[in-house]
Image: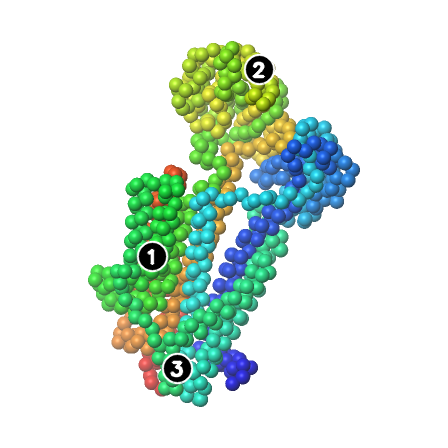
């Protein structure tokens, strides 16, 4: 038979009967789901790459050591905040008349002019505080080429060249491509591919189970075709073509569904949003998924048919009997023992790399290999401990379906284990120290702003509505008096001012109170009683850095244990009264901090205070943040990965539930005559539902439990191997995973109820 004839006959067989249509539609739906998930995964990285490339296109080409005449323009940028929205601010000054504008701008703004994004332009029309902060004349809007996303807030401000320091590095243009991607922390470099692999396996299991869907009915049809005169090769080709056609329909449908989903997601992404072209995967990757998925499904069908012997009088499937064997537990046991050995011996560094990777690989492989043993073991335990016919039948059905369910159980076990470990190592991605920032948050009064400033506020400059406290801290260089400078820094401040921005005032605050920083008291030179002096940087030469002595510093009454939790204020050895520091050291200080507490919750009042603080800053140091924002920034990387991991975990559990449902549903329909016989003998529908629930739980929950148990030694071993990285077992997330497994069991049973209603029909017992 020619290929066209085979395709035509296959199409007729696929949609000719009600059961054939259901099988075809279900297979197409499963392929569509797999296609959508794969396309989403392939679009995640290109989205970040597209936004990163657009960011690089508008980045200046700065060259270290260049003089002003070498460039065409001067530019600097910082991130402002308005009503909890981040605002990218860029100052630019042309050096030459041919200075090129950045992408998205028709020309560079002149002093007193600004170019804004469409979102900022709309906000400037209605928000007076924002207009007060950026009063320049708007000469245009930034085009799409200059935006990270359609809703990005960005401002380009024109300034004069003398607004930049004389030694500021010039730029020759735009489009500075980053040389290397900043590497992920060590744990994440391994966790990311492990997590992706763990999320991909449920999809593959779902596709395999969908291909095997309806095998008994297909077998009977194959026998009928052989009886009509077709050869064994022809009926195998018809089966492969049928599955391939369903896979093609599903894959193309999944591609269309993904396009609709991508358009909706692009319009609703938080922050700057994303352009539609950014959320689409690369064309080669999309083509490989849309084409490769049907090829994989067809190849799976062809491989499965190798065990099928098709004769005119019937079909025989040569299937292996799943037996429980202790050897299947050996890789898992060795991996767990290796992980425990790492923890017990406290090996770190290079000596722990190979053992840790070996332990992780053995644990993950062992979870997959031991899946049949887990299924049969739990079923045997149910037979020993369970009571009642429902438990007995559920255990027997779990034993009978162990071969089918083992694939899903192993995938779920690996998924839970990898996810638990991945969630544990995510804090390694944090750029700051959220723990110390949390301590600072507990010491500072609510709604306290922190900012680096160029000068102290003038009297009355910050007497604004809502301001209840202002503290100015100055970093000073100290050393032994008359003996030359030796590295040692402290903070000059007023304890009364600092108390106004703290939840509790500093103890024993007086004109001469000096507060020592927590830590080594013996090593704190403020408390040793030696003669101290303030120093100032003078010059740098091949012989070293030269400092000049400005005058003596007299620590007053020493107070201990008062600055706990204030480490992130960079107080150095402690806080010395301003009156005890030479005036020149205060005026020429290179680092000054301002803390301002605002009691009002009115956003207009808050933003006006922020604008006033920015007036004390210059250049690219205009960052006014509260501690809550600093904590969010410090946790932004791990929070993003955690959200992606949890989203992927939810999707993977959905896919695993569907995969297990398809596998068990296929077996349910295969055994529907036996189930109908049970119903005819008086077994209630409620008991049959309990049987399904018990069978599904026996198949799914052991893998989830094994994955959670194995995740704990992997986390502890990694914490030890990574030289004492402070990792904690994510008990809350693991509990959520366990709850998700229980929900998955219930979901699988609910999805199987319609088929159960059909299977308990006693008319199936009637022989035609």
CA gap, disc 3 and disc 2: 97 Å
Foreground residue among 564 and 118: 564
The one of 33 and 628 positioned closer to us in this rendering = 33
Foreground pick, 484 / 681:
484
Q: Please name the residue that numbered disc 2 is placed on.
A: 548
Q: Is residue 375 left or right of residue 246?
A: left
The residue tagged 1 is 366
Q: Image quarter for residue 86?
A: top right
Mark toward the start of the polypeptide (3 vs 1): 3
- Count of marks, rendered view: 3
Name the element at disc 2: strand
Above or below: residue 163 compared with residue 353: above
Which x, y percent locates residue 651? 46, 57
Horizontal and vertical percent for residue 559? 42, 17
Question: Is 497 located above or below residue 48 in the figure?
Answer: above
The residue at 26%/74% (across/down) is 682
Q: In the drawing, does residue 709 fall left or right of residue 304? A: left
Is residue 739 among what the camera can see? Answer: no
Q: Residue at x 26, y 63 (%)?
A: 325
Q: Which residue is mark 3?
A: 310
The tag earlier along the polypeptide, 1 or 2, is 1
Identify the residue at image location x=59%, y=15%: 584
Q: For residue 667, what is the image quadrant?
A: bottom left
Task: Answer few, some or many: residues within 10 Å of disc 3's Cα (few below 14, many 20 plus, some between 14 and 19).
Answer: many
Q: Residue 704: name its quadrant.
A: bottom left
Q: Secondary structure at mark 1?
A: helix
């Amino acid at each position: 038979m020619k290929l066209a004839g085979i395709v035509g006959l296959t199409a007729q067989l696929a949609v000719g009967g009600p059961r054939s249509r259901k099988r075809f539609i279900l297979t197409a739906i499963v392929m569509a789901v797999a296609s959508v998930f794969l396309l989403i995964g392939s679009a995640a990285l290109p989205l970040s790459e597209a936004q990163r490339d657009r960011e690089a296109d508008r980045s200046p080409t700065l060259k270290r050591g260049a003089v002003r005449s070498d460039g065409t323009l001067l530019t600097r940028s910082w991130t402002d905040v308005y009503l909890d929205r981040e605002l990218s601010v860029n100052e630019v000054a042309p050096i030459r008349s041919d200075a090129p504008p950045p992408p998205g701008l028709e020309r560079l703004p002149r002093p007193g002019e600004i170019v804004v994004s469409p979102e900022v332009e709309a906000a400037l029309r209605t928000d007076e505080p924002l207009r007060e902060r950026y009063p320049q004349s708007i000469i245009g809007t930034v085009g799409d080429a200059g935006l990270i996303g359609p809703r990005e807030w960005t401002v380009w401000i024109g300034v004069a060249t003398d607004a930049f320091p004389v030694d500021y590095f010039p730029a020759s243009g735009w489009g500075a491509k980053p040389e290397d991607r900043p590497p992920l922390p060590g744990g994440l470099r391994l966790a990311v591919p492990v997590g992706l692999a763990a999320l991909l396996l449920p999809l593959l299991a779902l596709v395999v189970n969908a291909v095997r869907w309806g095998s008994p009915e297909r077998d009977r049809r194959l026998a009928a075709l052989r009886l009509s005169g077709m050869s064994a090769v022809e009926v195998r080709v018809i089966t492969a073509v049928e599955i391939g056609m369903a896979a093609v329909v599903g894959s193309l449908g999944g591609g269309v569904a993904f396009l609709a989903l991508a358009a909706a997601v692009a319009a609703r992404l938080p922050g700057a949003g994303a352009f539609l072209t950014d959320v689409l995967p690369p064309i080669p990757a999309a083509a490989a998924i849309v084409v490769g998925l049907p090829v994989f499904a067809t190849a799976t069908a062809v491989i499965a048919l190798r065990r099928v012997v098709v004769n005119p009088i019937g079909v025989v499937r040569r299937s292996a009997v799943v037996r429980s064997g202790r050897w299947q537990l050996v890789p898992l046991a060795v991996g767990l023992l290796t992980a425990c050995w790492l923890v017990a011996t406290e090996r770190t560094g290079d000596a722990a790399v190979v053992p840790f990777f070996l332990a992780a690989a053995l644990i993950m492989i062992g979870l997959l290999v031991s899946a049949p043993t887990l299924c049969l073991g739990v079923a045997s335990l149910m037979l020993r401990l369970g009571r009642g016919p429902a438990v007995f039948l559920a255990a027997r059905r779990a034993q009978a379906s162990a071969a089918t369910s083992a694939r899903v159980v192993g995938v779920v076990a690996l998924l839970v284990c990898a996810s638990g470990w991945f969630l544990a190592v995510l804090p390694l991605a944090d750029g700051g120290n959220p723990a110390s920032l949390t301590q600072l948050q507990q010491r500072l009064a609510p709604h306290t702003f922190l900012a680096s400033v160029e000068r102290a506020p003038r009297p009355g400059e910050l007497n604004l509505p809502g301001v209840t406290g202002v503290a100015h801290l100055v970093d000073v260089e100290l050393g032994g008096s008359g003996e030359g400078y030796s590295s040692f820094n402290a903070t000059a401040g007023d304890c009364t001012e600092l108390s106004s921005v703290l939840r509790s005032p500093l103890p024993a605050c007086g004109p001469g109170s000096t507060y020592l920083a927590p830590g080594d008291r013996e090593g704190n030179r403020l408390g040793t009683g030696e003669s101290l002096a303030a120093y100032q940087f003078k010059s740098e030469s091949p012989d070293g850095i030269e400092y000049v002595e400005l005058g003596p510093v007299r620590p007053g009454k020493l107070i201990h244990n008062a600055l706990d939790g204030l480490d992130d204020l960079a107080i150095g050895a402690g806080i010395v009264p301003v009156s005890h520091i030479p005036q020149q050291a205060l005026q020429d200080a290179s680092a000054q901090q301002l803390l301002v507490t605002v009691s009002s919750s009115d956003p207009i009042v808050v933003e006006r205070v922020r604008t006033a603080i920015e007036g004390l800053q210059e250049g690219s140091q205009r960052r006014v943040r509260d501690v809550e924002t600093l904590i969010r920034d410090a946790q932004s990387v791990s929070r993003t990965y955690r959200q992606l991991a949890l989203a992927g975990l939810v999707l993977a559990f959905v896919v695993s539930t569907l995969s297990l449902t398809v596998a068990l549903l296929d077996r349910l329909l295969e055994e529907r005559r036996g189930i109908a016989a049970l119903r005819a003998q008086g077994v209630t529908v409620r008991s049959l539902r309990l049987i399904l629930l018990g069978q599904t739980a026996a198949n799914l929950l052991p893998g989830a439990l094994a994955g959670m148990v194995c995740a704990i030694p992997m986390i502890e071993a990694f914490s030890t191997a990574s030289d004492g990285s402070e990792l904690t077992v994510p008990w809350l997330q693991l509990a959520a995973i366990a709850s998700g497994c229980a929900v998955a069991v219930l979901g699988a049973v609910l999805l199987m109820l319609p088929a159960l209603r059909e299977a308990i029909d006693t008319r199936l017992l009637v022989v035609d």
